[in-house]
C-alpha cells in the first residue's frame, strides 16, 4: 500500500486520468442498470402489485394475457388459497386535452387485485368509474376527467389514482369487471359476462394445483418474461452492461500495462535489491483497487445526482443492491485487468535492469 | 567470512559463440574490508559482481553469503538474502523516481526485517550529508546527491555486504572522491564487506585490496598502488 499510494500521490494527473475513465464507465453501468430496472418496471409493476404467485391462462394463448380468454368459474375449481379474476383490454384514452395509450384491468372490487388508492375514491362508486395509474397525473389527467375511448362510445370517469400501476409500458385503468364487459362486448355483454382473460393465483403451492387441460398455470415471473418485448429489452441492456465490464477490464489492463512497461527497469532495480515480486505485484493490485474504488464510488454519487435531476419521463430506477453488485463487479474486473501487469512484473529479470 | 566464491565460473552461449565471462574464480572478502575490482571493459567485472550478489547463478562452483550457499536456495530465498544481507549501489540511479528521499528509505523499512531505529536513520542522513534533502525527489537532486542517497539505501539497516558497480561513473572527480570517502568510512565504521567495481584508477588509494579482472580471470593486483 505504501508504494502504491506514494506513486499515486506523486503522479496525480496520470492516475486521475485512469480514475476518471473508470468513473465514466461506472456511471454508464449504473445508469444503464437504472434504465434497465426502470424499463422493466414500466412493464411489470402492475403485475408485481398483485403480490401473487401464479397466473392461469389458456394453453392456446401462449402465455399472453391479451390472447387468453376463459370462464371465471374455473377459479373455483382450482382449489387455490386465493384467486382473483382479471379481464383486460387495451385502448386509447382521451380526456379532451391529451390522448394516452392505456390498459384496462377489469376486476372484482372484493378481489385482491383491487388497488390501494393514493388519491380519490377507494371503491368503484360510480358506473364506469376508473382508478387510474398515477403516471397519468403527470400527463395532464385529473380526478373527475371524462375519458373517451378509441374502441367504444362509453365514457369513463377518473375517480381515483393509484401508484405503481403500469403494465407493458402502459398506464393501467382499474375498472369494475361488469363495466369492462359492457365496454368490451357491447350488446353481447350478457352472454360473455363470465369471460375473463386470466385467473391470478395467490398460493405458494400453486405448482401442485390441478388445472383443466385447455388451461395452463404459470409462475408470475414467467408470465412477466413473456410480456411483449420484455425479455428482449432486458437482455439488450444487460448485454450492454456486460460489455462495459469487458471494456473497463480492457482499459485498465492496457493503461496499467503501459505504466508497468515504463517502470520495468525501476521494478528490476527494486527486485535486484531484494524487494520481492510479490510486494511489487501487491502494490499494483492495491493501486488498481484504490483507483477503481474511487472511480466507482464517485461514479455512484454522480449517477445518484444525475438521477435526481432527470425528468420523470426518463424511466430510470436505481436499485441500491444492483448498483452495489455492479460496483463490486467493476472493481473486481479492474483488478483482473491488473493481472497482465502482475505477470509482467513477475517475469522481470533484475539482472537486465542492472545492465553490464 | 561474509562472502566467498568457490571455483565459480560463468559461461554464456555454447560452441562457437561460447564466452567465458568469468573463468574459475576463488574469492573471499571479510567484514571491514574495502575491495576494488578494476579491469577493461568486457573483462567480466559486472558478471563477477552480479554472481557475488546472487543476481545470477554461476555456471559452475559455489557462492556463499553469510554461510548460505546460494545454489541451494530458490529465487525467493535469494531475493531475501539480497534484501537482508546486501546493499547494492549501481551506476545508474537506483532510486525510485516517485519517492522522496525519506520515502526511499521508508520503503526499505517496510520490506526489511529488523527495522532501523529512527535515530540511527537520522545519523545515516547526517553521515551522508543528506539531512536537508529528506523531502526532495530524485529528479530534484544532483548526480552526486543521488549517489549519496543510493549509498544511504545500500547502508540501510546495516547489510553485511555492499556491492557497488561503478558508483562514481557519473560524477566529477571531487564528487567521486567524496563518495569513496563515504564508502570507506562506512565500511570501517559499520564493518561491512565492500566490493567496488571501477574503471577509475585514481580512486585506488581508498581500497584495502585491488583485484584486476582480465578476460574473465580475477587476480589480486599488487602493483596497483605504484
Ligand atoms: N547475458 C550475457 N549473455 C552473453 N554474454 C554476456 C552476457 N553478459 C555478459 N556477457 C559477456 O561477458 C563478458 C563480460 O561482461 P561484463 O558485463 O561482465 O563486462 P564488464 O567488465 O562489466 O564490462 P564493462 O566495464 O563494460 O561494464 C563480455 O564479453 C560480455 O559480452
Ligand atoms: Mg560492467
Image (spheres, helix red, strand yellow):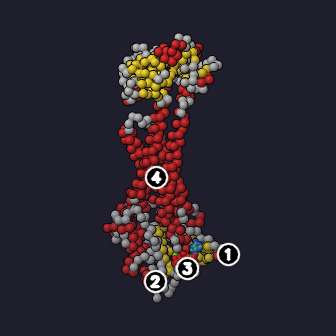
Circle 1 marks a residue in which chain?
Answer: B
| Residue that label 2 marks | B201
For the point 39% across and 79% down, which residue is it? B172
Cβ atoms at labels 3 and 2 below 8 Å apart: no
Residue B51 in the image: state x and y as whole percent.
55, 71
Q: Mark 1 against mark 2, which lies toward the viewer?
A: 1
| Residue that label 3 marks | B43
Helix, strand, or loop for circle 4?
helix
Helix, strand, or loop for circle 2?
helix
User: Label 3 to label 1, Cα distance in Å?
Assistant: 20 Å
Residue B119 in the image: state x and y as whole percent.
34, 63
Tell me which label, 3 or 1, sits earlier in the chain: 1
Q: Which mark is residue A288?
A: 4
Q: Residues within 10 Å of mark 3 (few under 14, many from 20)?
A: many
Circle 4 marks a residue in which chain?
Answer: A
Left or right of residue B222, residue A124 in this image: left
- In the image, B8 versus B45, the foreground residue is B45
Amino acid at each position: 500500500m505504501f508504494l502504491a499510494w506514494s506513486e499515486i500521490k506523486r503522479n496525480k494527473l496520470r492516475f486521475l486520468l485512469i480514475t476518471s475513465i473508470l468513473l465514466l464507465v461506472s456511471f454508464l453501468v449504473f445508469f444503464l442498470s437504472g434504465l434497465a430496472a426502470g424499463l422493466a418496471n414500466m412493464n411489470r409493476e402492475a403485475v408485481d402489485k398483485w403480490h401473487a404467485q401464479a397466473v392461469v391462462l389458456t394453453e392456446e394463448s401462449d402465455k399472453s394475457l391479451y390472447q387468453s380468454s376463459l370462464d371465471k368459474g374455473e377459479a373455483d375449481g382450482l382449489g387455490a388459497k386465493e384467486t382473483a379474476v382479471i379481464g383486460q383490454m387495451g385502448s386509447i384514452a382521451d380526456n379532451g386535452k391529451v390522448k394516452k395509450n392505456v390498459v384496462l384491468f377489469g376486476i372484482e372490487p372484493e378481489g385482491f387485485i383491487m388497488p390501494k388508492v393514493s388519491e380519490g375514491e377507494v371503491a368503484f362508486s360510480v358506473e364506469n368509474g376508473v382508478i387510474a395509474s398515477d403516471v397519468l397525473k403527470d400527463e395532464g389527467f385529473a380526478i373527475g376527467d371524462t375519458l373517451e375511448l378509441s374502441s367504444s362510445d362509453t365514457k369513463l370517469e377518473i375517480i381515483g389514482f393509484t401508484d405503481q400501476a403500469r403494465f407493458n409500458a402502459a398506464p393501467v385503468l382499474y375498472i369494475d369487471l361488469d363495466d369492462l364487459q359492457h365496454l368490451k362486448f357491447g350488446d353481447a355483454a350478457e352472454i360473455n359476462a363470465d369471460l375473463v382473460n386470466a385467473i391470478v393465483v395467490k398460493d405458494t403451492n400453486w405448482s401442485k394445483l390441478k388445472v383443466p387441460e385447455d388451461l395452463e398455470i404459470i409462475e408470475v415471473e414467467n408470465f412477466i418474461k413473456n410480456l411483449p418485448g420484455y425479455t428482449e429489452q432486458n437482455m439488450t441492456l444487460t448485454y450492454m452492461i456486460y460489455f462495459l465490464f469487458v471494456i473497463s477490464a480492457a482499459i485498465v489492463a492496457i493503461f496499467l500495462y503501459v505504466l508497468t512497461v515504463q517502470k520495468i527497469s525501476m521494478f528490476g532495480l527494486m527486485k535486484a535489491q531484494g524487494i520481492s515480486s510479490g510486494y511489487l505485484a501487491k502494490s499494483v493490485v492495491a493501486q488498481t483497487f484504490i483507483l477503481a474504488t474511487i472511480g466507482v464510488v464517485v461514479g455512484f454519487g454522480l449517477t445518484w445526482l444525475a438521477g435526481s435531476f432527470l425528468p420523470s419521463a426518463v424511466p430510470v430506477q436505481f436499485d441500491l443492491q444492483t448498483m452495489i453488485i455492479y460496483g463490486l463487479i467493476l472493481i473486481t474486473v479492474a483488478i483482473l485487468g491488473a493481472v497482465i501487469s502482475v505477470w509482467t512484473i513477475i517475469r522481470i529479470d533484475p539482472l537486465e535492469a542492472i545492465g553490464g | 567470512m561474509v562472502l566467498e566464491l568457490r571455483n565459480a565460473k560463468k559461461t554464456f552461449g555454447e560452441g562457437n559463440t561460447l564466452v567465458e565471462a568469468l573463468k574459475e574464480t576463488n574469492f573471499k572478502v571479510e567484514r571491514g574490508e574495502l575491495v576494488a575490482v578494476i579491469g577493461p571493459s568486457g573483462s567480466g567485472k559486472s558478471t563477477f559482481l552480479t554472481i557475488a550478489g546472487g543476481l545470477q547463478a554461476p555456471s559452475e562452483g559455489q557462492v556463499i553469503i553469510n554461510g548460505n550457499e546460494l545454489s541451494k536456495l530458490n529465487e525467493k530465498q535469494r531475493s531475501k538474502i539480497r534484501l537482508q544481507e546486501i546493499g547494492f549501489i549501481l551506476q545508474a540511479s537506483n532510486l525510485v523516481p516517485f519517492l522522496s528521499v525519506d520515502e526511499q528509505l521508508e520503503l526499505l523499512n517496510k520490506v526489511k526485517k529488523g527495522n532501523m531505529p529512527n535515530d540511527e536513520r537520522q545519523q545515516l542522513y547526517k553521515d551522508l550529508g543528506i539531512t536537508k534533502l529528506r523531502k526532495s525527489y530524485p529528479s530534484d537532486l544532483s548526480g552526486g546527491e543521488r549517489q549519496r542517497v543510493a549509498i544511504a539505501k545500500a547502508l540501510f539497516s546495516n547489510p553485511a555486504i555492499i556491492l557497488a558497480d561503478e558508483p562514481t561513473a557519473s560524477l566529477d572527480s571531487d564528487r567521486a572522491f567524496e563518495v569513496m570517502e563515504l564508502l570507506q568510512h562506512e565500511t570501517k565504521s559499520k564493518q561491512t564487506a565492500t566490493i567496488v567495481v571501477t574503471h577509475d584508477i585514481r580512486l585506488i588509494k581508498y581500497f584495502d585490496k585491488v583485484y584486476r579482472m582480465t578476460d574473465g580471470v580475477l587476480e589480486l593486483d599488487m602493483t596497483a598502488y605504484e
